[in-house]
Image (spheres, grey):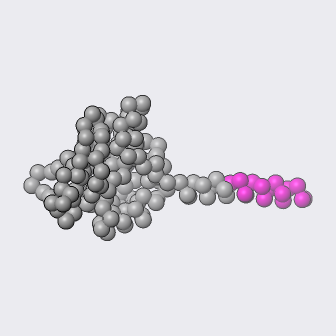
Amino acid sequence: MKFTFGFLLLCFVIFSSDEIKAQNQKINWLTFEQLEDSLAVKPKKVFINFYADWCAYCKKMDAAAFKNQTVINLLNTNFYAVKMDAEYKENISFGGKVFKNKEIGKSRRPTHEIPKLLGQRPNANFSLPLTLILNPDFTVLQRDFQYISSKKMIAILEEANH
């Protein structure tokens, strides 16, 4: 009887710790420099999220969609995920070019060159949150300028993966 109870307790502890680890998983966010290195080693689709500290919907996505275990698993398994502050002030080397935030000192909310280039759309201003899915060659597959719920994010990621 003691052996059975001890064995069951051990199984519970092992499975519980695996479940806790799964619940504490996080998205493996990369920088653009890390992305370039990763794409050189193994081509894979790319997920990019541009945000700003002042963006309420960006914070809401962080708290909901990017904490959802299904979203985390889909991103970590099928994509290289990049998260970048759209107002980043440092230069970024990518694809043999240097990208800058040319609006520093000229704008109240200076937007870096990379989100502006990837977030271009005709007859509309740049806005956040901006979420992109790209092929390994940086062809844009999907571009969203809005809050995306966990449920919608799962659908987007599953669709992009097929």
Q: Answer left or right for 76 relative to 45.
A: right
Q: Looking at the image, which residue sits at the far top?
A: 41
Residue at the image position 30 percent from the left and 44 percent from the top? 92
Q: Secondary structure of the magenta portion, mostly?
A: helix
User: 4 and 80: which one is in front?
Assistant: 80
Could you tell me residue 97's position as x and y percent? 25, 37
In what quadrant of the picture does the N terminus appear?
A: bottom right
- Depth check: give the residue in front, 106 or 116: 106
Residue 103 x %, y %: 18, 56
Q: Which residues make up the magenta segment?
A: 1-15
Which residue lies at the image location 55% right of the left edge and 57% below the top edge? 24
Which residue is depicted at the point 25% across and 60% down?
Answer: 128
Residue 5 in picture, x, y percent from top left: 84, 59
Q: Quadrant of residue 41?
A: top left
Quadrant location, the C terminus: top left
Q: Does 58 lie within the magenta span? A: no
